[in-house]
Amino acid sequence: MILEEIVVRLSDLIKQGLPLENEDKDKKEEEKEEEKKEKVQEEKKDPIQFRDLSVLRTLYEELKTVLQEEKKPEPLPIRLPKEEPLSMRLHRQEEPRVTKAQETSTLHDILHKVFPAPSEARPQVDEDLYEKTCSLAKSIRDAVRENAQLPLESAFSLITEIAENPQLLDILYKQEISTRVMMEDLFVTHSINVMVYAMKIGIGLGYHESQLLELGVAAIFHDVGMLKIPEEIVNKQEKLTDEELALLRKHPEFGAEVISTLGGSQYPWLLHVVLQEHEREGGQGYPRGLKAHEIDEYAKIVGMADVYEALAHPRPHRREYLPFEAVKRILDAYRGHFPNHLVKILLQKLSIFPIGSFVRLNSRAIGRVVETNESAPLRPTVEVFYDSQGKRLKEQKIINLQETLILSVIDSISEEDLPSGG
């Protein structure tokens, strides 16, 4: 029933007072006249009468619905904003999009002072990137020891470059694989490695550039509290006493104090990571025994990267674990310490045996990884250079360990440890 029909019908009913029920059209003329006379008399008493009020109510509801639909505005099209490069977002005058970990952070205000105006050209891959990253870690170490302002400006600048160019992260990762840990620079190498691992995990989680920036900065500063622990305790080769262990476990609180007093108090997410990176999913950690959702997600990532790095590299009191041994330790000894989805990303993104790294197979042959597979990180494709006797092959062989199940990787070795004459 259209609007005009409803209005006309209501108008006729109101003016004429006609009943809604249909009358018999075959009635005699005299009966109709009789009824008309009766209706005229009734109109004088009550001009409008309906035998069934529900009919009028139905008509009214139909009319109201039609009117409401006519006034209802059409929805506006939804336009999603385009994702901008991080460097452009950081330099816009308006407030940037708030990320999960920023919350009450004033990151935009600080970064606007830190960075120069962005250039149109994207930064090129820097061959000296690892040295620049080492210099940053050393300047952090020196600032803490001298109780001076932390080099936050340098950290934001360098890690922004890495966050915007994932290939730089791969360069650092390969460099980390081939660099031997020097005990005198343990803080430096450990901080860089944890930063690289954490950012690769962040990429696996789908983090965008601004989140990777925050995560990378937090990772390279995560262990500043250790610089407040006497070196004789940090480098002690014998088992620590209960008093020494208790002091060592205070380093997250020392680190939070360093961040708060030396220029980083305006970054809540940085304080959370430094203070919470030793907290564990089931409450096994310290200093507060936090659990699950009580722990910042960045702190969980950095904490897992910290454990993996410590296992995969030598320490004063032990040798390093092989990469797959380190993963096995996390899966066994650290079961329940980290969320399962983060452990899965660790296995996928760190590749265990990255492209370019040298490995030894269970046949004692030696080769270089030329391709990795995230679905099977322990079974890369290897280009074999040396046979089981350490003799250089005249023709290199390409072996896909996913297809050749009888072979497997048992060790990763540095280029310096290759057989002589290679």
Image (cartoon, rainbow, N blue to C red):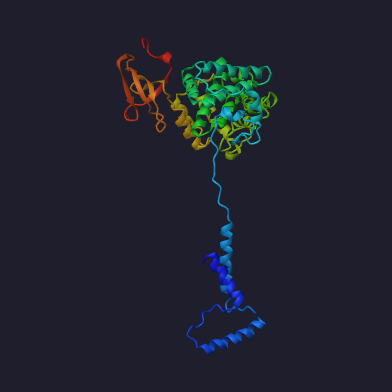
Q: Quadrant of residue 391?
A: top left
Q: Residue at position x 54%, y 25% from top?
A: 195
Q: Residue at position x 43%, y 13% from top?
A: 416
Residue 329 seen in the figure? yes
Q: Percent from the top left, x then y, of residue 360? A: 38, 21
Residue toward you, 204 or 184:
204
Horizontal side of 106 relative to 386 (left or right) equals: right
Residue 364 seen in the figure? no
Q: Residue at position x 58%, y 20% from top?
A: 187
Q: Percent from the top left, x then y, of residue 99? A: 59, 35
Horizontal side of 148 relative to 183 (left or right) equals: right
Q: Percent from the top left, x then y, of residue 57? A: 59, 71
Residue toward you, 417 or 90:
90
Q: Quadrant of the C terminus?
A: top left
Residue that protrudes farthest toward the top in the picture? 421
Q: In the rendered view, would you say 317 is above or below 253?
A: above
Residue toward you, 226 or 14:
14
Q: Quadrant of residue 19?
A: bottom right
Horizontal side of 171 relative to 98 (left or right) equals: left
Q: In the rendered view, would you say 404 is above or below 74?
A: above
Q: Percent from the top left, x then y, of residue 204? A: 49, 32
